[in-house]
Image (tube, grey):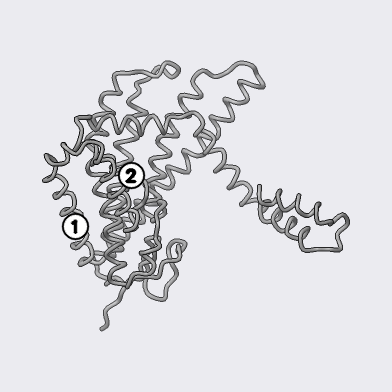
Amino acid sequence: MHSETLAVHGDGAADLVGGPSLTEVTGLPPIAVPRSPVRDVIAVVDRAFARTIEAIAALLVIAETLILVAGIVSRYVMHNPLIWSDELAQMLFMWLAMLGGVIALRRGEHMRMTTFVKIAPPDVRATLEAVALGAAIAFLGLILAPAYDYAADERFMSMPGLDISNGWRAAALPVGMLLMLIAGALRLAVVARLGAVIVAIVLIGAIGGGLFALQPWLGGLGNLNLVIFFVGIIALCVFAGVPIAFAFGLATFGYLSLTTTTPMVVLVGRMGEGLSHLILLAVPMFIFLGLLLEVTGMARRLIQFLAALKISPGIRGSSPGWLMKNIGIEKYI
């Protein structure tokens, strides 16, 4: 008999030592995690959960693309715009963005700084990884109730084009945050050592409890709180490898809840407004076109062709100026 371990990569992939990675490795060295029957069962649940979310997100990308194309054709070709297309596209995009956040959290692909995490010893790195994931889970747990209140308030409003409750759009926030919370908990159970999880809980609880205990003192500091939360707390989180979005979320939540009387529903409302911006509707089209270029092989052929133009002096017209223009085109692509 021998004890098996899991090799946990920087992107959250976990597999038997020497086996293939489940997801693309992000460059962080693997962390050995003891294998157990319970961890294996949770890993199966985690994979099933991830596949379900990814399938729904893929369907939303297809639906979003079709709706946007239909809206463009009806407006600029048929000259008979669909009055409901923009509202439906905005609603679906909010759901797509939240599901994308779930997938990114599960894969460990939220933007973060790993400079200090990479150079840390294995034991310290395992603790920092647990702290980073624990901080994200803590923010999601704190913001979940205000997100539900926001969605409950929005259900009394209606979208004029679709003539349905705005709650269908706003519900994406609490549902997405709950799914992210589940994804984070599953990932923590699969890829983190028990000792690292305990240390992470103690550290996060100590910092949060300390700030809560200092609330009366913080109330009298005025604008100095901006430095404490938006410089000190954010720097601490970012250097520890916490995803940047969650670092800013924790700092904002802490500042508003501990030093002001602003209800947290306002924070959730600002998040909803940001996700509802019309210009973001171009993102699903970029995703679709990027996949189209990749699947058809057009991107690879374009880069290979332009690279050949740069390195082949025998090609007619390959003067330095002409080549520089093609280099610019290649960078643009």
Q: To which residue does mark 1 refer? A: 201
Give the left or right position of residue 118, taking residue 306 as reference: left
User: Which residue sits at x=29%, y=70%?
Assistant: 33
Q: Considering depth in this image, is 231 or 258 the residue closer to the camera?
A: 231
Callout 1: SS? helix
User: Which residue sits at x=33%, y=54%?
Assistant: 242
Q: Considering depth in this image, is 148 or 41 the residue closer to the camera?
A: 148
Q: Position of residue 18 (x, y in %)?
A: 41, 76
Q: Quadrant of residue 30?
A: bottom left
Q: Position of residue 26 (x, y in %)?
A: 45, 62
- Mark 2 is surrounded, within 10 Å at the Cα level, by few (under 14), some (14 to 19) or many (20 or more) other residues, namely many
Residue type, numbered disc 1: Ile
User: Which residue sits at x=72%, y=53%?
Assistant: 327
Q: Position of residue 59 (x, y in %)?
A: 47, 40
What is the C-alpha distance between the residues marked 1 and 2?
A: 20 Å
Q: Position of residue 221 (x, y in %)?
A: 19, 39
Quadrant showing the N terminus = bottom left
Reply above or below: 251 against 188. above
Q: Considering depth in this image, is 156 or 325 the residue closer to the camera?
A: 325
Question: Residue 248, labelled with which disc?
Answer: 2
In the image, farthest residue toward the right:
316
Residue 180 in view of the camera = yes
- Mark 1 is surrounded, within 10 Å at the Cα level, by few (under 14), some (14 to 19) or many (20 or more) other residues, namely some
Callout 2: SS? helix
